[in-house]
Amino acid sequence: MTKPLRIGVAGLGVVGTSLARLLHRQANALAMRAEGPVVLAAYSARSPRPERPEIAAARFWGDAVELAAKADVDVFVELIGGAGGVALAAVKAALGRGLPVVTANKAMLAAHGLELAALSEAHGAPLFYEAAVGGGIPVIKTLRESLAGNAIRRVSGILNGTCNYILSKMETERLPFDVCLAEAQRHGYAEADPTFDVGGFDTAHKLAILASLAFGSKIDAEAVSVEGIESITLDDLVAADELGYRIKLLGVAERTAHGVEQRVHPTMVGKGAPLAQTMGVLNAVSIDGDAVGELTLVGPGAGGDATASAVAADLVDVARGVRLPVFGRPAALLSDADRVPMQRHEGGYYVRLTVVDRPGAMGAIAARFGDRMISLEAIMQKRATKEWAEAGVVPVVLMTHGTTEASIRDALARTLEEGVVREKPQVIRIERDGV
Ligand code: HSE
């Protein structure tokens, strides 16, 4: 056995507490895998926690940045969260003195990943972040190491447990959005601010990280087009079900003829696809590589123990002296992200319209779609409920064959202008089978 690996952890929230327990519970196995004991030597939190046996022997620091800069530790673990502020200052302080860093902070990496990768290289201090994407799923290792022999064509995934939990529960239990969000929060899946989850921003941060690893590009969170799940109704979930689809919040990074698309939006996924079968708080990532073909990793994407599992694996890598470029290649060799405007996206669309119930309304809509060369695959018009009938409207769902985002938006704008459609149309992109 060699000398112990002394860990300094900043943040004792859900993940930090689970990590402390895991290190205690798995002490023997970790000591063998890391070729020396893995010891929680220091921690920072809002207040000391002497009552917890797992951290009783660790030194308390009231200031995370001071811990990162001064504590007598071999690795700094950042579990505070937030794109900047204390988390960023502490990580910079640790890297700046050559201390390896393990973080679960996707928002920080999305905003400052390139700068941190350069700092890590300059000071010879590794930066690991398996827990930042997909919770317990080893997707960072998979892209950075296991698939290094592939040209990646596409990465698509369910990257937010809260959203997947909400959509799954709404669909299976026919419950409204708010009730399902409250349940997710009760289970501790949601971010401090749920807008990060349901607005798609958490997924966007994670997607930006995966896109950088997959395409060897500088992380560019602003290139991600983001839509959340707030507008998804039970009607959409039921219609999707009847048409053979499930609605999932997907993050997709894909090389197209125009560049690399990075997009987060609710998506109709054919029920046979692995991503459609991923329910509840589970996350899943499908990766399409030229040599390996398509593979899908599925597992718990949120929660203390699952996330601590990923942090612990990074700690063992630190103990073993593993050194890898942060985004799979040296920072200086990362290319500029190849942005593609969403208007150029090509694919099928689900459109739900509130159509004015009068002769010729459907004809006018079909004509506007025809003008834009949009071919319809399916049309569903249900008998209006009493409420709809009183308002003089009927709900209509259209499914299109492949077209462009620009054409769909243009056709819909025209139908609104002509007054045959009321309310903002619901537009959900359809992914090809197999994702
Ligand atoms: N709020 C996140 C989720 C936690 O629901 O997936 C993990 O990043």
Image (tube, helix red, strand yellow):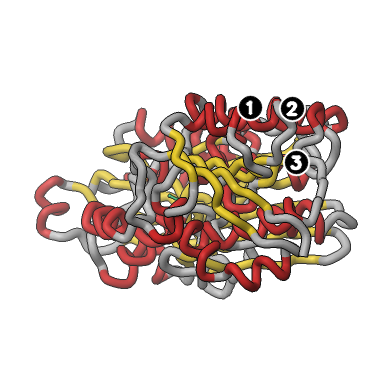
Most foreground residue, 141 or 348: 141
Which residue was labeled with disc 3? 126
Which residue was labeled with disc 1? 92
User: Taking 87 as reference, is 373 above or below it?
Assistant: below
Which residue was labeled with disc 2? 119
Residue 116 lies in quadrant: top right
Which residue is located at x 66 percent, y 54 percent? Answer: 315
The tag earlier along the polypeptide, 3 or 2, is 2
Q: Are marks 1 and 3 in contact (CB under 8 Å)?
A: no
Pinpoint residue 21: horizontal percent, then vertical percent: 46, 63
Which residue is located at x 38 percent, y 65 percent? Answer: 168
For the residues labelled 3 and 2, the Cα–Cα distance comes to 10 Å
Please name the amino acid that badge 1 sits on. Answer: Lys
Pinpoint residue 132: horizontal percent, then vertical percent: 58, 48
Please name the amino acid that badge 3 sits on. Answer: Pro
Relative horizontal placement of residue 278, taking residue 181 as reference (left or right): right
Relative horizontal placement of residue 73, taking residue 240 as reference (left or right): right
Secondary structure under the numbered disc 3 in the rendered image: loop
Which residue is located at x 75 percent, y 66 percent? Answer: 294
Secondary structure under the numbered disc 2 in the rendered image: helix
The tag earlier along the polypeptide, 2 or 1, is 1
Pinpoint residue 327: horizontal percent, then vertical percent: 76, 41
Which quadrant: the C terminus?
A: bottom right
Which residue is located at x 27 percent, y 48 percent? Answer: 359
Q: Is residue 337 visible?
A: no
